[in-house]
Image (cartoon, rainbow, N blue to C red):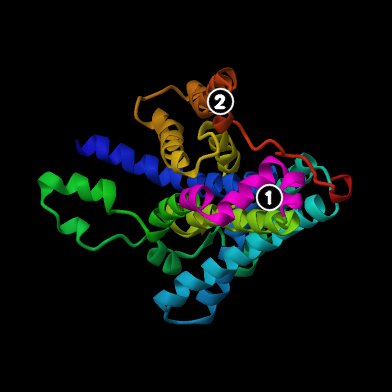
Amino acid sequence: MNFIAQFLQRAILQGTPLLFGATGEIITEKSGNLNLGIPGIMYVGAISGVIGGFFYQASVKTVNPFLAIMIPLLSCLLGSLLVSLIYCFLTITLHANQNVTGLALTTFGVGFGNFFGGSLIKITKSEVPFVALTKIAKYYHASLPFVKKMPQGIRWIGTLFFSYGFLVYLAIILAIVATVLLKKSRIGLHLRAVGENPATADAAGINVTAYKYFATSIGGMVAGLGGLYFIMDYSGGIWSNNGFGDRGWLAIAIVIFAIWRPNLAIFASYLFGGLYILFNYINAKMQLIPIMQMIPYVVTILALILTSIRKKRENQPPASLGQSYFREER
């Protein structure tokens, strides 16, 4: 039981940044915007949090727990918002191609993160190629105190459900809130109308531009939290250039696997997290590890084929996804 609990715990830890990214992208895509810049936004969110945390940690002798959490968190949200607004301006206001813009932002985000990450490493004059924010990260990684005091026989329950930092629970809460708002609220109804047919929504008096800006900005900030989680919690406050891997792309793949539903993205993210680390538990040969890490993408392709064959409208992406809206053509 303890072995299974430990595997599931690691799957949840691995899947949390994917859940942030997938939830943010689902919110964005519900407005009709296809933001392939999510990997770059997650990267910018991570380095923005690192920059804020670095200068705070370097400026004080004793770290305040509240500020240790809030400064990197707000820095992450601000950095993610600014990059999302760049995407909004280019694709919504200037009607630039969404695919090209998203890919350009991903390249920009990775370069931005590596440049400033490398600069911080030089500032610290460190002999190792990374920045360590361990004083701040311990507050992100702190779990509920009673977990270690639980009896040995049921400690697996604490390991599986109560041994995470607050960002893990925040990711689940945001996915559930997004599900409720998209399905039950007037804002969600308007947003889905914009994603399905912006001309009809515009004719009904819905401000298409405002909803697209709003959804894309909120989605970008949620995705940016995935980058912050990966550095501050999963990696223990250690930033190293190019250390984020392909998690941003996995988050986009989860959107398809979860058929554009944030609640299903919770399950899909943890499933992908488990598949991503599966090779650690089956003693796979080194040559097979890259193949095993392809499994989440293969599963996504199969899910895409199945949903396409069934042709249920509720399982399809928004009808205007990836298309620019020209109001004068209405």
Question: Please, is residue 179 above or below residue 304 in the view?
Answer: below
Residue type at numbered disc 2: Lys
Residue type at numbered disc 1: Val
Query: Residue 236: x percent and y percent?
Result: 43, 57
Query: Residue 102: x percent and y percent?
Result: 73, 45
Mark 2 crowdedness (10 Å alpha carbons): few <14, some 14-19, many ≥20: few
Query: Residue 79: x percent and y percent?
Result: 65, 63
Q: Residue at x 70, y 47 (%)?
A: 106
Q: Which residue is mark 1?
A: 110
Query: Residue 103: x percent and y percent?
Result: 74, 42
Front residue of 312 and 156? 312
Q: Which SS type dominates the magenta stretch?
A: helix
Q: Is residue 35 visible?
A: no
Q: Residue 312 has which mark? A: 2
Asked if residue 228 is among those painted magenta in the image, a careful observer would answer no
SS for dot 2:
loop
Which stretch appears magenta? Answer: 179-204
Front residue of 190 and 267? 190
Q: Earlier in the sequence, mark 2 or mark 1?
A: 1
Asked if residue 192 is among those painted magenta in the image, a careful observer would answer yes
Q: Is residue 77 visible?
A: yes
Q: Residue furthest top?
A: 309
Measured Cα–Cα span from mark 2 to mark 1 = 37 Å
Question: Please, is residue 174 above or below residue 270 in the view?
Answer: below
| Left or right side of 87 for 2 | left
Q: Residue furthest right?
A: 328
Say if mark 2 contacts mark 1, CB within 8 Å.
no
